[in-house]
Image (cartoon, grey):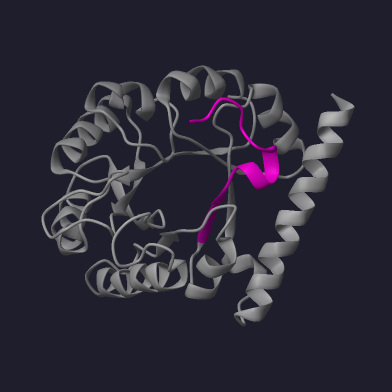
Amino acid sequence: MTDRKNELAANLAKVEGRIAAACAAAGRGRDEVTLIVVTKTYPASDVRILSGLGVRHVAENRDQDAAPKAAACADLPLTWHFVGQLQTNKVRSVVGYADFVQSVDRPRLVTALSREAVRAGREIGCLIQVALDAGEGGRGERGGVAPGGVAELADLVAGSEGLRLGGLMTVAPLTGEYAGHEQAAFGRLMDLSTDLRRTHPAANMVSAGMSADLEQAVAAGATHVRVGSAVLGVRPGLG
């Protein structure tokens, strides 16, 4: 366990250094960017180590893995983010532990989240997942609503009991005009965030950037970066 703690501490220090350097290069304060460590496929013991190292935000993308892990770490001062595509039949479980759902991309999901949040007596922060590879009215390859659908979905979240509109999230697209152009993709997300804040001023979260492209996200103005492998190591069995 000591070896793992040392490994995670060293990786975390490198990521913190990258974020700090990216903030300095962009003329931003380090406190303007929140690190979310994506702990998917890794055990609750790693989450405990990370908490002890000062991590306060963690993310998961599969409820069947996240629910027991969150329960095992319920005593820790953590904010849990759900970042994966979410089926409505998993919403009740996710609402039980997630403080934020970053993958809100359709009205039916908003309705289900609102219903379960009210039932549980909780307020869930919601980020609209924007698919920059989607045609107008379509959805992205990895979920998300097309840019043209953001305003309507945001209004629905903002008007739903038990939910709080937090802002926007995106994943750098693998196809379409922004493929391979992460900086431009994140810049487009920031433009959409500016538009959103005209009608919803408190929806100021911009979640973008992962292990490979966090610098571009910080340069564009992201408030949250989601980093997994750079902290925890390369995940086994992905394909």
Query: To which quarter of the image does residue 5 belong?
Result: top right
Find residue 142 and report its horizontal and vertical position in percent: 32, 44
Find residue 237 and report its horizontal and vertical position in percent: 56, 25
Query: To which quarter of the image does residue 212 belong?
Result: bottom right
Depth order, front residue of 125/137? 137
Find residue 214 and report its horizontal and vertical position in percent: 57, 61
185 versus 24 height, above or below: above
Point out the stretch of residues depicted in magenta.
224-239
Query: Which residue sits furthest bottom?
Result: 27
Residue at 13% over, 58% down: 152
Count of numbered marks:
0
Residue at 39% over, 65% down: 204
Instruction: Specify the quadrant that holds the N terminus.
Output: top right
Residue at 36% over, 21% down: 93
Query: To which quarter of the image does residue 3 belong?
Result: top right
Depth order, front residue of 238/132? 238
In the image: residue 20, left or right of residue 104: right
Q: Is residue 235 magenta?
A: yes
In the image: residue 39, left or right of residue 83: right
Find residue 124 and report its horizontal and vertical position in percent: 35, 40
29 versus 65 height, above or below: below
Depth order, front residue of 218/118? 218
Q: Is residue 12 magenta?
A: no
